[in-house]
């Protein structure tokens, strides 16, 4: 459990450092993201972004868990 928490902490640090780069990739403005803007109302539903993030996190977590299992 201790190793998992250390690796999870490192992943969070890496994601925090990479956040400015990720912001420049255009996440949140992908084709498929729903944006409704009215006079006094704005609604954003980033469905395509959520799918991309979900796939990337799934792959990342599987790789981490396989590496932990080999230790």
Image (cartoon, helix red, strand yellow):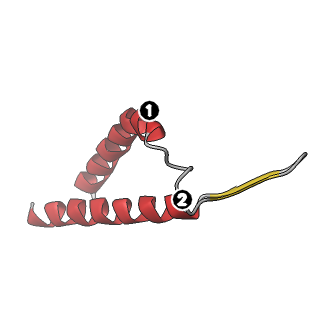
Q: Earlier in the sequence, mark 1 or mark 2?
A: 1
In which quadrant is the N terminus drawn? bottom left
Q: Picture quarter containing residue 57?
A: bottom left
Q: Secondary structure at mark 1?
A: helix
Name the side, left or right, on which 12 lies relative to 10: right
| Percent position of residue 27, x then y | 50, 48
Name the side, left or right, on which 37 lies relative to 52: right
Give the label on residue 47, or none. Answer: none
Residue displayed at 43% across by 58% down: 53
Q: Residue furthest front?
A: 31
| Percent position of residue 54, x then y | 43, 64
21 or 2: nearer the viewer: 21
Instruction: Look at the picture and state if 68 lies above or below 29.
Output: below
Residue tagged by mark 1?
20
In which quadrant is the C terminus drawn? bottom left
7 or 24: nearer the viewer: 24
1 or 7: nearer the viewer: 7
Q: Residue furthest left?
A: 70
Q: Picture quarter containing residue 25?
A: top left
Circles 1, 2 touching at the beta carbon (< 8 Å): no
| Percent position of residue 6, x then y | 28, 47
Give the label on residue 31, or none. Answer: 2
Q: Secondary structure at mark 2?
A: loop
Label 2 environment density (alpha carbons within 10 Å; few <14, some 14–19, many ≥20): few
Residue displayed at 56% across by 50% down: 28
Name the side, left or right, on which 26 lies relative to 38: left
């Amino acid at each position: 459990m201790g190793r998992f928490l250390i690796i999870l902490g490192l992943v969070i640090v890496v994601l925090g450092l990479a956040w400015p780069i990720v912001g420049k990739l255009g996440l949140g403005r992908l084709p498929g993201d729903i944006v409704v803007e009215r006079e006094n109302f704005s609604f954003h539903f980033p469905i395509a972004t959520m799918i991309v993030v979900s796939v990337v996190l799934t792959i990342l977590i599987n790789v981490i868990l396989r590496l932990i299992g080999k230790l």
